[in-house]
Image (cartoon, helix red, strand yellow):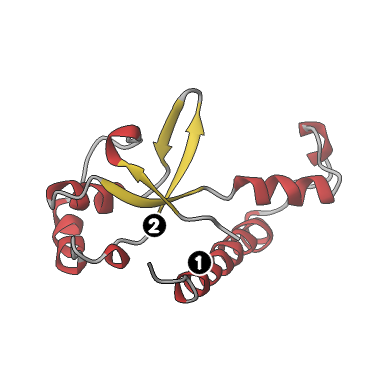
Amino acid sequence: MTKIFEMRLEDMQPSQLYISFEKLCEVMKRFNPSDPESIEPIPIKKLGDDVIFVDGHTRAFAAFLCGVYEIPVYWEAYEICVEWCRESGIRRISDLKNRVVPQKDYEILRYKRCEDMQQDLEKKRLQAARFKPSD
């Protein structure tokens, strides 16, 4: 299950150069600084010595604008994808020699599986949040 935890905004490196004004306006309409549940957890990844935003720059910026300096985050689920490869005997790049497929098949085999995984992780996150003991 994906572990959600709090991290300080200043401890994370952005990975995009701009924020869409229109998207920011939409996020700000839904954001409530006094309700931690109003910000969807943001995926992060370790890159060298840095922790980087994989997505969620607009949500993080909205939190910053509202004076919220810690946000919910989770480690991006690459470990699941690596486990899929190991289970299928894919351990080095040469193991992909018989797995080159047309784009249409690729979308089904790769994108669909990853999309299903993300939806499953989100369901588990929501279930965990529902059953979280109150402080």
Does 97 appear above or below 48? below
- Amino acid at pointer 1: Arg
Residue 41, how many percent across, how many down? 39, 57
Does 128 appear above or below 105? below
**Quadrant position of the C terminus in the picture:** bottom left
**Secondary structure type for disc 2:** loop
**Secondary structure type for disc 1:** helix
Q: Which residue is mark 2?
A: 41
**Which residue does the image show at 61% across and 63% down from the upper left?**
117
- The disc, 1 or 2, on the residue closer to the chain's N-terminal end is 2
Q: Which residue is mark 1?
A: 125
Residue 109, how many percent across, how many down? 69, 60
Q: Say if mark 1 contacts mark 2, CB within 8 Å.
A: yes
Category of crowding for the residue at label 2, using alpha-carbon neighbours closer than 10 angstroms: few (below 14), some (14–19), many (at least 20): many
Looking at this view, name the residue that lies furthest to the front.
135
- Kindly report the distance in space between the C-alpha atoms of the residues bearing marks 1 and 2: 9 Å
**Quadrant position of the N terminus in the picture:** bottom right
- Amino acid at pointer 2: Pro
